[in-house]
Amino acid sequence: QVQLVESGGGLVQAGGSLRLSCAASERSFSSYATGWFRQAPGKEREFVGAVSWSGDSTYYADSVKGRFAISRDNAKNTVYLQMDSMKPEDTAIYYCAADYLGWGTPNVHDYDYWGQGTQVTVSS
């Protein structure tokens, strides 16, 4: 059982930056692909980006490509989501999720474990 805890959310002005962290309870976290998803009120949960379990590959939704970046520090059992040039439409609850030996699929149903989410609000 892998427990995930997101942190780093908050309120930021448009054009600003935030860095979210996803900390895992298990050292085996290095064997999991980690995805970031978000859910705005009244909308379905959507893929933001992911990093493969090896850390060799990252994938991003078109809406965040060039603005967001994912990295992982296996020594700290943590994956980060750096968000720059933020827009009001980035406002949502952000979740991280883990997929054992995964490549970084954008399919929400392929992930085995989820964090509780952290609120991100971008003001215009």
Image: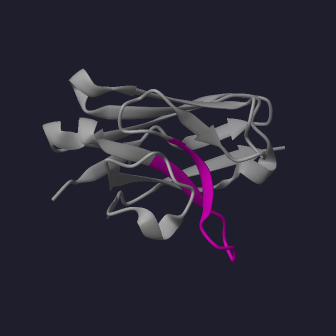
Residue 30 at what x, y percent from top left?
A: 26, 35
Residue 9 at what x, y percent from top left?
A: 51, 43
- In the figure, 1 relative to 31: above or below? below
Image quadrant in which you'd find residue 26: top left
The quarter of the image holding the C terminus is top right
- In the figure, 113 relative to 109: above or below? above
Image quadrant in which you'd find residue 37: bottom right
Residue drawn 41% across the image and 45% down it: 34
In the image, which residues are magenta? 35-50
53 or 74: nearer the eye? Answer: 53
Residue drawn 17% across the image and 44% down it: 25
54 or 50: nearer the eye? Answer: 54
Residue 67 at what x, y percent from top left?
A: 73, 30
Image quadrant in which you'd find residue 117: bottom left
Residue 15 at what x, y percent from top left?
A: 79, 30
The quarter of the image holding the N terminus is bottom left
Q: Is residue 66 left or right of residue 4?
A: right
9 or 33: nearer the eye? Answer: 33
Q: Is residue 52 left or right of residue 39?
A: left
Total number of numbered labels? Answer: 0
Residue drawn 46% across the image and 70% down it: 109
Q: Is residue 58 located in the magenta-colored stretch of the structure?
A: no
Q: Is residue 47 located in the magenta-colored stretch of the structure?
A: yes
